[in-house]
Amino acid sequence: MMTPILDLIGVGIGPSNLSIAALSATKTQLSTQFFEQKPQFSWHPGMLLKEAKMQTSFVKDLVTCVDPTSPYSFLNYLVTQGKIYPFLASGQSTLSRLEFTDYMSWVANQLPNTQFNAPIEDIQYDKGQFVVIHEGQEYLSRHLVIGTGIQPMIPTCAKPFIGSNCFHAGEMATIQPNLTNKRVAIVGGGQSGADIFQHVFDGIYGAPSRIDWWSRRSNIEALDEGCFTDEYFMPDYVNRFYHLHSPVKTQEVQRQKLTSDGITNECLQGLYQRLYQDKFVRQTPAWWSINPSQKLINMQHNNSVYHLTYEHTLTGKKHTAEADIVILCTGFKRCLPNCLSEVLPHLKIDANARIELGENFNAKWKKACENEVYIVNAGTYSHGIAEPQLSLIAWRAARIINHLFGADLYRIPESPNIVNWLLPLKTNCPQNQANSRIYSSDELTSFN
Ligand SMILES: Cc1cc2nc3c(=O)[nH]c(=O)nc-3n(C[C@H](O)[C@H](O)[C@H](O)COP(=O)(O)OP(=O)(O)OC[C@H]3O[C@@H](n4cnc5c(N)ncnc54)[C@H](O)[C@@H]3O)c2cc1C
C-alpha cells in the first residue's frame, strides 16, 4: 500500500506543537500528524510541583486567542469537566501548572492527529517531500514543524556530579528526593529556583536541616508583569521586532529578560511572608540563607559532601559552602534534535550559527524550495522574547497553518497596540507563500 503524503508532520508534542495540532485538527483541508517520544502528554513533568503556578493567563491557552469557538479551549475543558462555576468562584487569574497540564492532556487525548511513544529518529529530504522515520516506519510529508523544546542547562563544574543528590530542577518531581535533615543548596535565582525554595522550605520533600539559595543575579528579581510590558507579547510587536537588525534584537532581548525570566509577584510575596514569619515572628535559629550576586565556579565532592565555590559578582570574593544535596535551577537551553541532522545542511545559518528563520517561523533554505521546515520555540533571536512563551502559541500556530496551506484558514485580524513603537511593519510580507512558489526542477533536485 502506498504511504499517503501528509501536508504536515510535527516532531514533538509540547504546548507549541499541541497548539498547531489542535488548530489543524478542525481544518479538514489539512492532513497532519504529530509525533511525541513520551508515552503520553506531559509538560516538564519533573517541574510539576504541587504549588507551582503559571506565569500567563488561562485565556492564553492552545487555541482561544485565534479561535475561541474551538472545542479545544480551556473554557470548554472547564465546562466538559463540570467545574466552570467553582473555577469562576475561585477567582484565580493564573492556574496551577497541574491544572494547565491536565487541560493540555485532555486536548492531546482527543486529537486524532497525535501519536505518543513515537520518537522520531531520522528525517530525510527526498524530491519534494520529507521522509520521517520512527522505528523503521516511514511517514511522508510536504512540510515539517519541529517543536522539540528545551533541554536542561547544567553548569560545567557540576556536570561530573549529576546523580540523585545533585540534579537539575527539571528532575525534582521525578526524583522526589528525601531532604530530611539534609543541607540543601539551591543554585539559580529564577522562577524554578523560587518554586523549589518554597517547596523545600515548606518541607514537602522532608524537613531539611538547612537551605542555602544562591543566585548570580544581583537580587531575587520580580517578573515584569506591567500592562505595557505585555505589549511585547502581542502580535503587532513581534511583527515589528522581526524587522529590526540582528544586534539590536540581541540587545533588546537581553534588556527585556525580566519580562519572562523573573519571579511572579504572587510567588515572591508568599515567599517573603514565610521568611518574615520564620525569622521575626517565630524567631527560629538561622537555618536558611538567600545569597544574590553569587556565581557557582567550582564543585568538589568528598565523603558524600559537596563543596561549592562561589564568586561574588560585585566584589570578586570567593568562598566555599557545603551541601548534601544540590539542586540546579540553572535554566534550559534550546537545541535542535539529532533527527534533523540530514536536513540541517540545506538550511541557511546566520553569522552566529543559528538557523535563519522567516517571518512565518519557516527555516530559510540555502536554495529555494517549496517545502517548509517550521521551527517553533527556537527563534528568540529572530522573533523576540515572546517566542519561548505560551502567550502567542495560538497566533503562531495559525500563522504557520495559513502559510503552509497557502491561504487564510484562520483569519488573523490586525491587532494594533496601545504603544506607538514607530518600528517598520512590512505589511507586504505575504503570509501565503508556502505553496505558491514555482521553482525549476534543477533547484528542487539539487538537495538529493
Ligand atoms: C517549569 C517551566 C514552567 C513554565 N511555565 C510557563 C508559563 O507559566 N507560561 C509561559 O508562557 N511559559 C512557561 N514556560 C515556558 C514554555 O511555555 C515551556 O517551556 C513550554 O513547554 C514550551 O513548549 P514546547 O512545546 O516548545 O517545548 P516542550 O514543552 O519542551 O516540548 C517538546 C516535546 O518534544 C518532545 N521531543 C523531543 N525530541 C523528540 C523526538 N525526536 N521525537 C519525538 N518527540 C520529541 C519532547 O519529549 C517534548 O515533549 C515554562 C517553562 C518551564 C521549564
Image (cartoon, grey):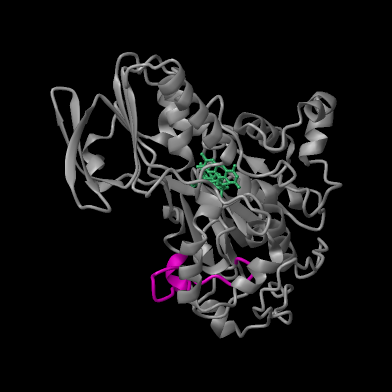
Q: Is residue 357 left or right of residue 430?
A: left
Is 346 magenta? The answer is yes
Quarter-of-image position of residue 270: top right
Q: Is residue 426 left or right of residue 36?
A: right
Is 339 magenta? The answer is no
Q: Nearer the viewer, residue 217 or 101?
A: 217
Residue 51, compared with residue 19, is above or below; it is above
Residue 154, compared with residue 170, is above or below; it is below
Quadrant observed for ligand 1 in the rendered image? top right
Name the outermost residue toward the front: 280
* Residue 7 appears anywhere in the view: no
Looking at the rendered structure, the number of numbered marks drawn on it comes to 0
Q: Nearer the viewer, residue 160 or 447?
A: 160
Residue 233 percent coordinates (x, y) = 65, 58
Residue 375 percent coordinates (x, y) = 56, 60
Residue 344, compared with residue 392, is above or below; it is below
Residue at (42% x, 60% y) in the render: 341
Question: What secondary structure predominates along the stretch shown in magenta?
Answer: loop
Residue 357 percent coordinates (x, y) = 55, 70
Residue at (48% x, 72% y) in the render: 347
Q: Which residues are magenta?
A: 343-361
Q: Nearer the viewer, residue 427 or 298?
A: 298
Q: Nearer the viewer, residue 351 or 254?
A: 254
* Residue 233 appears anywhere in the view: yes
Residue 325 percent coordinates (x, y) = 29, 26
Quarter-of-image position of residue 15: top right
Name the outermost residue toward the left: 302
Residue at (37% x, 46% y) in the render: 153
